[in-house]
Image (cartoon, grey):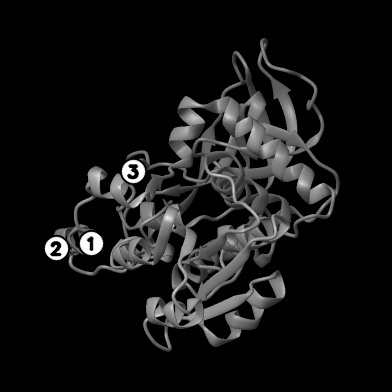
C-alpha cells in the first residue's frame, strides 16, 4: 500500500534536511503489526541524526522516529492479534515519521483516548526513565538524585519517578522559567547552570554530602564533575551526549568531547565504589526486547493510574514539521514534542 513519510535526505537545517515523500509499505510479516499513525514523537537523537552525528541512524535517505500513536490495522500471521483495530502507543526501530509504520507486536500497548503527545512521551522518554531508575539501578528512598536536562522529556519523568520513591531530587536546568517548572514537578533543589558552575552550586547545597545517582544525557565536560560529586555506592547513568551536538568544528569537536571526559579506569571506580552505566535504548530494544516490553507496560500503567503526568512541550501539525524540529534543537523547550498528521 502507498503511504507518506518525512524522509531525512541530507545533513542540514530542519527546513533543508526533510522531504515529504510517498513510499510503498509492505504487509506485516511474522510477528509484525502495521500501525496507521495518528501522531509521532520527536527525540534529540533525531536531531543528532540530522546533523550526521548519530551512528546508529540508517543511511540517507531514511525515515527516523522511534514512536507513534495510532491504530493497528493489520497483523502478520504469527503476531499477537489482541491489539488489532485498537488505538495503541507503539515503539518502532526508526520509521516513525510516517503515516504508516511496521513494528513488533510486543512493542505496542493498547490505550484509550488520552492526549497523543502525552502518550508519545511514555515511549522513548518514559521507557528510558523507567529502565534507568527502576530496572537497571533502582532508586532508593534515601538517595540523592541529580537529573540533568530536568525540564526535558526524560528529565520530567525521572523527577516524578524519583519522588515516587521518596528520593531527594536535584534538578539542573538552563533557563530561569524552567526553575519553577522543575519545582512544580517535585524537585527539591534546582540549579541553573547559566548562573554559575552547576557543580559548585550543588556542593554549596550538599554541604559536604554527596549525590547517589546522576542521570546525565550531556556527557563531555559534565562527566568528571558528576563523578566527583558521587559518593560511595554512587551511580552515574550516561544516556546521551548532547554536548557533542553543540560542537561546530567536526572531528575537532568530537576529539575535544572525548578529551573532556578523560579515561575511565575500572580499578579506580572499584576502589571508590562508584559505577558508570551506559544506556542506549536502541541496543536494549534489539537485544533485550522483553525488557523493553516490561518497561513500556509498566510506565503506561503508572500513567493510567495517575502516578505520573508526562509533560507536553509542544503539539505541531505535520505542515509544521521543520518548526517542531528546530524548536527541539534549540534546547529551549520543555517536555515532549510531537507531530500530529493533518
Residue at numbered disc 3: 60
Residue at 57 percent of width and 23 percent of height: 26
The local crowd at label 2, few if under 14, some if 14 to 19, many if 20 or more residues have their Cα within 10 Å, is few
Give whichever of 74, 207 is nearer the camera.
Answer: 207
Q: Quadrant of the C terminus?
A: bottom right
Q: In the image, is residue 177 above or below residue 44?
A: below
- Judged from the image, the secondary structure of the residue bearing numbered disc 3 is loop
Q: Of tags 3 and 2, which is closer to the observer?
A: 2
Rounded to the nearest angstrom, the CA distance separating label 3 from label 2 is 24 Å
Residue at numbered disc 2: 252
Residue 151 makes an appearance in the image? no
- Judged from the image, the secondary structure of the residue bearing numbered disc 1 is helix
- Judged from the image, the secondary structure of the residue bearing numbered disc 2 is helix
Q: Give the percent coordinates (x, y) of residue 166.
A: 70, 60
Residue at 65 percent of width and 53 percent of height: 121
Q: In the image, is residue 308 above or below residue 280?
A: below
55 lies left or right of 263: right
Q: Give the percent coordinates (x, y) of residue 161.
A: 67, 55
The local crowd at label 3, few if under 14, some if 14 to 19, many if 20 or more residues have their Cα within 10 Å, is some
Q: Of tags 1 and 2, which is closer to the observer?
A: 1
Residue at numbered disc 1: 257
Amino acid at each position: 500500500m502507498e503511504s507518506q513519510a518525512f524522509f531525512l535526505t541530507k545533513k542540514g537545517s530542519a527546513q533543508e534536511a526533510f522531504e515529504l515523500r510517498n513510499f510503498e509499505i509492505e504487509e506485516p510479516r511474522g510477528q509484525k503489526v502495521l500501525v496507521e499513525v495518528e501522531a509521532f514523537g520527536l527525540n534529540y537523537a533525531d536531531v543528532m541524526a540530522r546533523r550526521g552525528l548519530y551512528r546508529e541512524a540508517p543511511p540517507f535517505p531514511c525515515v527516523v522516529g522511534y514512536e507513534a500513536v495510532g491504530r493497528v490495522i493489520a497483523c502478520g500471521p504469527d503476531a499477537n492479534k489482541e491489539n488489532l483495530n485498537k488505538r495503541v502507543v507503539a515503539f518502532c526501530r526508526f520509521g516513525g515519521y510516517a503515516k504508516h509504520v511496521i513494528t513488533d507486536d510486543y512493542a505496542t500497548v493498547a490505550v484509550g483516548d488520552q492526549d497523543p503527545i502525552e502518550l508519545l512521551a511514555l515511549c522513548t522518554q518514559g521507557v528510558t526513565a523507567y529502565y534507568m531508575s527502576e530496572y537497571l539501578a533502582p532508586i532508593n528512598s534515601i538517595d540523592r538524585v541529580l537529573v540533568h536536562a530536568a525540564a526535558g522529556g526524560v528529565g520530567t519523568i525521572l523527577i516524578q519517578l524519583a519522588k515516587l520513591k521518596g528520593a531527594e531530587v536535584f534538578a539542573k536546568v538552563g533557563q530561569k522559567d524552567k526553575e519553577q517548572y522543575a519545582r512544580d514537578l517535585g524537585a527539591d533543589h534546582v540549579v541553573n547552570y547559566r548562573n554559575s558552575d552547576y557543580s559548585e552550586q550543588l556542593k554549596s547545597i550538599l554541604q559536604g554530602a554527596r549525590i547517589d545517582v546522576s542521570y546525565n544525557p550531556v556527557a563531555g565536560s559534565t562527566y568528571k564533575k558528576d563523578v566527583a560529586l558521587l559518593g560511595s555506592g554512587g551511580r552515574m547513568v550516561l544516556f546521551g551526549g548532547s554536548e557533542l551536538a553543540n560542537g561546530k568544528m567536526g572531528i575537532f569537536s568530537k576529539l575535544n568531547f572525548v578529551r573532556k571526559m578523560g579515561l575511565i579506569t575500572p580499578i579506580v571506580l572499584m576502589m571508590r565504589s562508584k559505577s558508570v552505566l551506559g544506556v542506549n535504548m536502541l541496543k536494549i530494544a534489539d537485544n533485550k526486547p522483553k525488557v523493553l516490553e516490561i518497561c513500556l507496560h509498566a510506565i503506561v500503567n503508572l500513567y493510567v493510574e495517575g502516578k505520573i503526568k508526562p509533560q507536553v512541550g509542544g503539539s505541531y501539525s505535520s505542515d509544521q514539521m521543520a518548526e517542531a524540529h528546530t524548536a527541539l534543537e534549540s534546547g529551549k523547550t520543555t517536555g515532549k514534542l510531537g507531530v500530529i498528521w493533518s
